[in-house]
Amino acid sequence: MVDWQALQQTIGITFRDMSLLQQAFIHSSYINENPSFCLLDNERLEFLGDALLSFIVAEKLYHEFPHFGEGELTEIRISLIRQETLAQLALTLKLGDYLHLGKGEEATGGRERQTNLTDTFESLVGAIFLDQGLDTARVFVLSKLDSHLERVNAEGIGRNYKALLQEFTQAKFKQLPTYRVVEASGPDHDKGFTVEVVLGDRVLGAGSGKSKRAAEMEAARSAWEKLTAD
């Protein structure tokens, strides 16, 4: 049996409407196998949480870095709410332990799957907003991203890996990389993209994200880190 009290203690929030908290952890695979279940899956909450994360972080960066332009702020925002970061936050909070999964999803490691963890964190943010309001959602999100924001402050603006990769390949290979979408999945309101970055006929790296821009940045980061390590 799921210990919702323990989860609320972990996140530091007591829900007024417990059904919102529970819905944040219902994967679509569970509803597919249990169509008469009393709650919907978490996809609508995920949609809301994704938008809230983008807004909360954008608002914070707008005030935190008053001299940065749109491009610089966008790169930092992408780095803070990328899939890997959100999945790691979900792991730290042990959100995967509370997921309701279908048998197939459970058997194939769904509790540890990065996309599921990211979606669950976003769904939880959406549920917190609906139950407690924007201020509580803002405090929750920024408290979880605090160490990442400190790193940005310490190191300066997040690296523009697309620019770094372009400079590297131009200098070493006299060629510029190109990007291609190899997969687009999910409903229209919440698509996910996988992008490869290529040089000639060579795939340098791949990345995933909630937008083509974010996926390209991840692909560029992967490629640049591999090339510079080599």
Image (cartoon, rainbow, N blue to C red):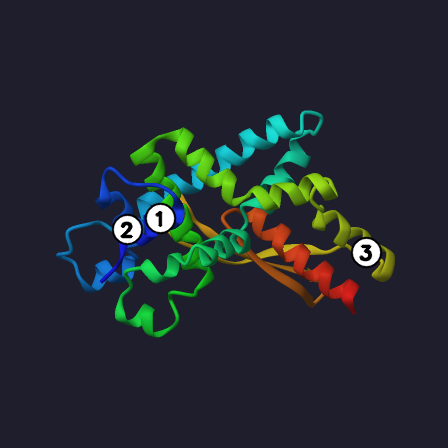
Rendering quarter of residue 67: top right
| Alpha-carbon span between mark 1 and mark 2 | 6 Å
x 77%, y 51%: residue: 164
* Residue 206 falls left or right of residue 173: left
Indicate the amino acid at tag 2: Gln
Task: Determine the residue positioned at 32% across, 53% down.
Answer: 6
Q: Which residue is mark 3?
A: 168
> At x 61% / y 54%, what residue is drawn?
218
The reply, left or right, for residue 120 in relation to residue 103 is right
Badge 1 amino acid = Gln
> Residue 45 versus residue 202: which sits nearer the camera?
45
Q: Secondary structure at mark 1?
A: helix
Q: Position of residue 59 (x, y in %)?
A: 54, 29
Give the residue at mark 2. Answer: 5
Residue 175: image quadrant is: bottom right
Q: Is residue 42 above or below residue 143?
A: below
Q: Quadrant of the C terminus?
A: bottom right
- Tell us which disc is closer to us: 1 or 3: 1
SS label for mark 3: helix
Hey, what amino acid is under mark 3? Phe
Front residue (pair 181, 81):
81
| Mark 3 or mark 2, whichever is nearer to me | 2
**Marks 1 & 2, CB-CB < 8 Å contact:** yes
Residue to which mark 1 is pinned: 9
Dot 3 and dot 2 residues touching (CB under 8 Å): no
